[in-house]
Amino acid sequence: MARIVQKYGGTSVGDVERIKNVANRIKAVREAGNEVVVVVSARSGVTNELIARAKSLHPSPPDRELDQLVSIGEQETIALTAIALDAIGVLAKSYTGAQAGITTDKVYTKAKITGIDGKSIEKDLQAGKVVIVAGFQGIDDEGQVTTLGRGGSDLTAIALAAAIKADKCEIYTDVDGVYTADPRVVKDAKKLQEISYDEMLELASLGSKVMQTRSVEFAAKYNVIFEVRSSFNTNPGTIVKQEVAYMEKVVVRGVAVDKDQAKVVVSRIADKPGTAAAVFRALAEANINVDMIVQNVGHDGVANLTFTVPQSETLKAEKALAPVLKAVGGTVTLDDKIAKLSVVGVGMRTHSGVASTLFTALADAGINLELISTSEIKISVVIAKDKADDAARAAHKAFALEKL
Amino acid sequence: MARIVQKYGGTSVGDVERIKNVANRIKAVREAGNEVVVVVSARSGVTNELIARAKSLHPSPPDRELDQLVSIGEQETIALTAIALDAIGVLAKSYTGAQAGITTDKVYTKAKITGIDGKSIEKDLQAGKVVIVAGFQGIDDEGQVTTLGRGGSDLTAIALAAAIKADKCEIYTDVDGVYTADPRVVKDAKKLQEISYDEMLELASLGSKVMQTRSVEFAAKYNVIFEVRSSFNTNPGTIVKQEVAYMEKVVVRGVAVDKDQAKVVVSRIADKPGTAAAVFRALAEANINVDMIVQNVGHDGVANLTFTVPQSETLKAEKALAPVLKAVGGTVTLDDKIAKLSVVGVGMRTHSGVASTLFTALADAGINLELISTSEIKISVVIAKDKADDAARAAHKAFALEKL
């Protein structure tokens, strides 16, 4: 007997037929003698529909009311899932975030979990019930409903797994694991059996879209081993954990492409101490996520500063920079016809030559590198967006990932 | 300055345009210097949609989960209403039943309010906020969500008005008050300016459909004066209170018709002590609402027992009676082609001749009486359903209600 936390995303519980399917899966796991806690998201589309309704009333609805509103999406699916389980003879009980004792800070729409009181859940598990918990939501110390922001349901599952000391945490989604590259682009991409938190973090932050980084960070912090797998088949997924057996041998474990970035070039700004700080302080104050940053050597007292931001934030970035550039000089150019390609692997730490293999492969494919940045376990390059798929295939081949 | 509780039903908040309309009404009342607490129902149709979804998963979903599910309907409208108010510059805060401190017993789907802790609401009112409370829902002492059953939002409004000592309670609905008869049937029906709790109770229980009896009973118990009025115009509505000024003068105040009843005749049952008790015990145990009951004088050791039940419960009634009839003999006949017509008025207590006026008017209109029953403030008759509208017009005219 094991204690298992399962999380089903919005597509997996998208309609009553899919909820029935999920209920049958849960039943099988329960009847195999396991204790089961299930975290569900809102049916796919529901959260966006609610937000659209709110925005038709108000250009920027108050965050507290937005959380009060969107939290009903998960409350619907917990009840429906518990009902579907009861219909097939499985004792089940639904829990809102508040009922599950998930407390958070007061930062509406992107609250952080501050604690989980698992006592009620523990009692129901001991009474033989399957416990269904609303993902994505919690409650602050004044009883206000909060939501955890994007990827919040994964976070709920991983935090619950830590709190109730689960033996396993399974994240069900619409892909059946983490691949060496996007299988729609790279035909011979392979599913990884295991991956380390660090590698998953880089892949998550690099547009592989399987999970948000904060959930992976949380799992790493509390050492929660989890498996990413599909709710539409029974294939084994990818297990994410601290150390991976063959880590020393394998250098590169995946190629990720992010097409949602834009390049911002700030040209001819004063080449003196404090200029870069002023630029990035303005961006930070506007809450803009800046990614790769490159500054070249200055000439004639001026320098160029280049960085990438999410495409959706380019106008906000331009606006935030205007007053700074007035002060320190310089002009801004935006380019959203770019993509970021990254190769990721913990093994990279102890192997040289990864950069040269990548750059050679891309050069051979006739692809120009606009920016380069590296970390301990990844190398990222910015290239033309229309070359991104070719680049992914070339990199995948260069590291022989199809043979993993 | 007054403290006002307003309740808007599902049609009044049916879509975002109507929610905007409600927000504008609230704004006007708030800006006139009043403290405002608003109770809202789910958008019309939402509750039924959720129940249908649950029933597509389960023929009889567990009540606890049903309450967890349907309570999201009101949670949506409280948030949307607060957002709509914020959009027009009115400080507002939404409250679920739990957040409003509305505690109930544990009878899911038809819980009774056991208490209201109005402290948070009081604080927000003092801070100048409009408070928006989810109708129809509460929380038990273990944090489980409960719902109050049909008419629950009216009950929430009236109970809140009592708890926070409101000066006024306004129940907004899609009719603009209580009429002397259904204006769609009786063209010269008049809106009543005032009506007593007792009269309202009879009208409510007689298919005038303005409100459920339990809300009126609650208002009577705690002496909450409320006004029934329309959210689609600014006409004054009908005020419901303990004593009505001209009570002594006016005998009959309204004619109500209920076409949703069926007549059940239990023929040739043993005419001995305990038979009727056995019949009605069986019906009570099956939770069937029995209305008018008539037993004739027995002959030859057998008697006939006639009563009415809601049409939707006739099959349930037949099933509940089967074992009893096996024991005491007799057969059951069902007739759903009937209607119940009632005339109601507190003044009736002190006036004779009401019955004779009614019976004469119906006889003159060629309408046969199948059953008769009377209470202190009403006379009800069962007649053929296809004569119901004619009967309503004849009764209305006989008591000169168009001149009220």
Image: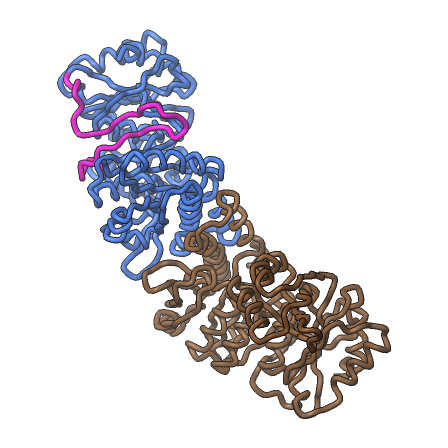
Chain colours: A brown, B blue
In the picture, the quarter occupied by the C terminus of chain B is top left
Is residue A162 toward the left or the right of residue B151 in the image? Answer: right
| Residue A191 appearing in the image | no
- Residue under the point 53% across and 54% down: A47
Nearest the viewer among B85 and A325 is: A325
**Residue visible at 28% across and 22% down?**
B380
Q: Is residue B34 visible?
A: yes
Residues A166 and A247: in front is: A247
Quadrant in the rendering for residue A133: bottom left
Q: Position of residue A202 (x, y in %)?
A: 62, 77
Q: Answer whether residue B228 is magenta in the image.
A: yes
Q: What stretch is highlighted in magenta?
A: B219-248
Compare residues B239 and B149 and report the one nearer the observer: B239
Q: Percent position (x, y) of residue A220?
A: 52, 81
**Which residue is rendered at x = 23% and y = 53% of the image?**
B119
Count numbered badges in the picture.
Answer: 0
Judged left or right of residue A286, residue B181 is left
x, y percentage for residue A128?
41, 71
